[in-house]
Amino acid sequence: MERAARPVSVGMADDVTRGVEAGRDFVEKCLTEDRSVYGSTTGFGPLVVFGGRADAEDQCDNVLQHLTAGQGPDLPVDVVRATVLVRAWSLSRGRSGVSPATLRALCDMLATSFTPAVPALGSVGASGDLVPLAHVVQALRGVGHAYVDGVRMPAREALAKAGLEPLALGGRDALSLVNGTSVTTAAAGLAVASLRRSHEVSIAMSALLTDLLGAAPAFLSPSLLAAFGHPETVVVGERLSYWLAGTAPTGLRALQEPYSVRCVPQLLGAARSGMEWAEQVVRRDLAGVSDNPLFFAEEDLVAHGGNFFGQPSAFASDMLSMTATQTGNLAERQLDLIIDPHRNEGLPAMLSPKAGEQHGVQGLQVVATSVVVAMRRACVPASVQSIPTNLHNQDVVPFGTQAALTALDQARSLRLLHGCLGVALRQAAHLRPGGATAPRCVELVEALAEVVEPIERDRPLDVDIRAAADALDRFVERHVPGLAHEATSSGDRS
């Protein structure tokens, strides 16, 4: 999903094409037998009790037009492109009755930089992400707006510039394209990918903080952490010990460190547990089919139900927001610790080389405080904010889309917090005689030093924060298998 932020080749295997064709043929068979099929022979939502339009192409237009009502700023390009990939993956199972040509059109789009302009507001995540997905499909038809190479323009112009033909729809194509939780799953998946890296970044920087303070790593005793009873805490302890191998404590610190050092295994262990559960939910979403109805030709069955109800991802996304926010709380407190001359083992206030004449990371801390409070304010669960809509057809809704988009925003805010802490730790290492002592912590300081100059004289730090966030991602990718990605820089992602 991250790779899809840029043009990516997505092929259709022969067995996929055959399966999709079989699903489409079964839908056509059902319609010739005058079976009642939601959205094909009926109206939509609570208007299911009325007949739909007689012509299939007109019926496709019918579902799209009334749903093209989204509001607010456009979703980020990477979210929309991941959404198209997720939708294609669901449709490829052959249970939605979509035509192979329509599925192929999604793959063709992903091979270009064409990206539909999709308003952020409009989905309740209950009958799928109807409104945002309608905007996706409309742009592919040449209606509305789209981006090519990051430039927003009328969709028809964008299609021509990207070398794509306007999408022609028939049969059940339109409803198949909009009737799933693909925006929700895409945003949640991107949040998981980002937070997995940030979790490792938090562990590495916690180790560097411990090393720069000259603290003894006694709180990482394997017996101690195993007695806590949570295996994820043991894993985090092992990762901290990996980074701290070879550290040289000063022996000047108090017997017990503040919780922002001593309780890192317990805090980040719990965060790891929450993220692993959320990742499992996203993977299950990706392995399933999100649509209604589903078509099972081998059983001669048209199954009407609720496989577009995004409650699993809603719960998981709220968990991601909570883990991101508490990890952000940790980073903000660690920043406060390293700049406080009463607690940072002799480093100057605000890490200034000459307090008063120079202010070090003073402005940076104000930014970090602002970011973490914004994260706390956004960390209100969306998954329980149900409100009836759609003439009480959708009388209980999960708001998974809002939960997932919030989780992704939280993940991106956490990266900025880590960028702030990274700049501060780099400055602390510069000011600390001898710098870091653990070899891997020294390596981390060197990685930060490649993109952040020491602060000898006050200068703007906005670019440094983002550069540090990117450098931290790259650093943990080199040390932790499975985290590598091809996402754009933090400036583009933001």
Image (cartoon, rainbow, N blue to C red):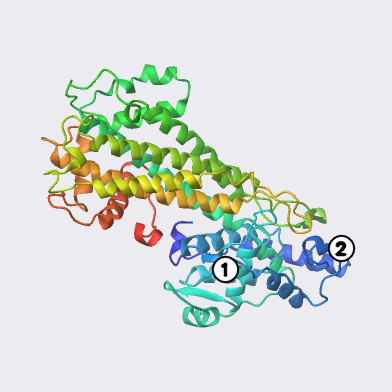
> Disc 2 versus disc 1: distance between alpha carbons?
32 Å
Q: Nearer the viewer, residue 90 or 464?
A: 464
| Residue at image coords 54%, 76% | 145
Name the mark on residue 106. Answer: 1
158 displayed left or right of 284: left
Residue 242: % across, % down: 29, 31
For mark 1, does the 10 Å Cα neighbourhood hold few (<14), some (14 to 19), or many (20 or more) residues?
Answer: many
Q: Amino acid at mark 1?
A: Leu
Q: Is residue 37 visible?
A: no
Residue 123 lies in what quarter of the image? bottom right
Of marks 2 and 1, the one in the foreground: 2
Give the total number of marks visible in the rendering: 2
| Residue at image coords 80%, 60% | 46
Residue 62: % across, % down: 74, 73
Q: Amino acid at mark 2?
A: Val
**In the rendered image, which quarter contains the C terminus?**
bottom left
Q: Secondary structure at mark 2?
A: helix
| Residue at image coords 65%, 78% | 168
Residue carrying label 2 = 49
Q: Is residue 46 visible?
A: yes
260 displayed left or right of 350: right
Residue 174: % across, % down: 69, 69
Name the mark on residue 258. Answer: none
